[in-house]
Amino acid sequence: MTSTRFLLRTTVVGLVALGATWSAIATPLKPDLAKSNVTIVFKQMNVPVEAKFKQFTAQIDFDSAQPQASKASVDIAIPSFDLGDPEYNKEVLKKEWFNAQQFAKASFVASSIKASAGAPAGSKYDVSGKLTIKGKTTDVSFPLSVKKEGSAQVFDGSLPIKRLTYNIGEGEWKDTSMVADEIIIKFHLVAN
């Protein structure tokens, strides 16, 4: 009878410890939005232009030991788009461009995160997922680098897209001689 109680007590203690360990692993990271940024780079009349989104949220549940079990999503507030000039900002929120009144949010949800072949362990990953802009959702993939800075993890990536795929620039703005079709979305996310 004593050995049965010991076995039962050991099993309960083991399950509690396992639950505590699992909670520590499964705890999502908290993004530090003050140190993070999402920008885009494009060419206007063949001159590089960089703009940023001032408001976004990120959910990151990342485990470098099991990247395939990791989850990530980012929501961007389209009305927070900033080209550095109030008149330009107002223009790009119109129907022909982002149509921010109807589509106030762009989002990315990862469906797969895998360690990159040949990269040092825990530093480079291949990410795939769904990108939704202006109501259009497509499958996208991009490389991701991860590094530690003190107690924080830093996620950096660049995602090239074509603006016309998402109807960004309708009517006369479909002409890519003024604003190039190629856009690079860059992100730098710092999380604890």
Image: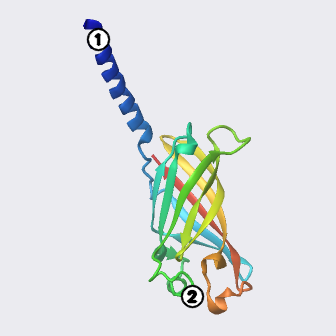
159 shown above or below 113 = below
Which is closer to the viewer, label 1 or label 2? 1
Q: Quadrant of residue 13?
A: top left
Residue lying furthest top: 2
Circle count = 2
Disc 1 + disc 2, Cβ < 8 Å: no
Q: Is residue 48 visible?
A: no
Residue 61 lies, in percent from the top left, at: 47, 47
Q: Residue at x 74, y 79 (%)?
A: 46
Question: What amino acid type should be assigned to the residue bearing mark 2?
Answer: Glu
CA neighbours of label 2 inside 10 A, class few (<14), some (14 to 19), many (20+):
some
Cα distance in 3D space between marks 1 and 2: 73 Å
Question: Which residue is denoted by mark 2 in the rendering?
Answer: 96
Query: In front here: 79 or 20?
Result: 20
Q: Residue at x 57, y 67 (%)?
A: 39
Q: Residue at x 56, y 77 (%)?
A: 83
The N terminus, quarter of image: top left
Residue lying furthest bottom: 172
Residue 4 tag number: 1
Q: Is residue 72 visible?
A: yes
Residue 131 lies, in percent from the top left, at: 57, 66
Question: What amino acid type should be assigned to the residue bearing mark 1?
Answer: Thr
